[in-house]
């Protein structure tokens, strides 16, 4: 796991909490902010996933070249 994956997951969870809190108190602005934070978190996590995939592919190609 890289830092983008971790930070993304944290943002996603924080957004879920914020959206749910907004829902409980009837604050649509907080709900919207929470949903926005979830989207940011999922995007950052996916960026981290892509970085990991590139890293793993590069390492596999390097290993294959040395075999």
Image (cartoon, helix red, strand yellow):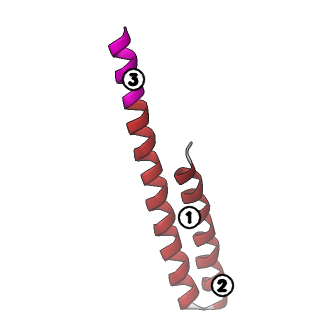
Please report the residue visible at 66 percent of the width from the left and 89 percent of the height from the top.
25
> Which residue of the protein is positioned furthest toward the top in this rendering?
67
**Residue denoted by label 2:** 24
Secondary structure of the residue carrying numbered label 3: helix
Please report the residue visible at 52 percent of the width from the left and 53 percent of the height from the top.
4
Q: Is residue 64 magenta?
A: yes
Q: Which residues are magenta?
A: 58-67
Judged left or right of residue 63, residue 28 is right
Bin the neighbour count of mark 3 within 10 Å (Cα to Cα): few under 14, some 14-19, many 20 and up.
few
Secondary structure of the residue carrying numbered label 1: helix
Q: Main secondary structure of the magenta part?
A: helix
Query: Splitting the image into 4 quarters, where does residue 56 fall?
Result: top left
Distance (Cα) linking label 3 and label 1: 31 Å
Residue 67 to residue 61: above or below: above
Label 3 vs 1, first from the N-terminus: 1
Judged left or right of residue 11, residue 51 is left
| Residue 9 coordinates in the image, percent (x, y) | 57, 57
**Residue denoted by label 1:** 12
Label 2 vs 1, first from the N-terminus: 1
Bin the neighbour count of mark 1 within 10 Å (Cα to Cα): few under 14, some 14-19, many 20 and up.
many
């Amino acid at each position: 796991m890289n830092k983008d994956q971790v930070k993304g997951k944290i943002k996603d969870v924080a957004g879920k909490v914020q959206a749910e809190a907004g829902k409980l108190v009837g604050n649509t602005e907080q709900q919207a902010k929470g949903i926005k934070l979830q989207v940011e978190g999922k995007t950052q996590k996916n960026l981290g996933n892509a970085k990991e995939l590139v890293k793993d592919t590069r390492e596999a190609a390097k290993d294959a070249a040395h075999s």
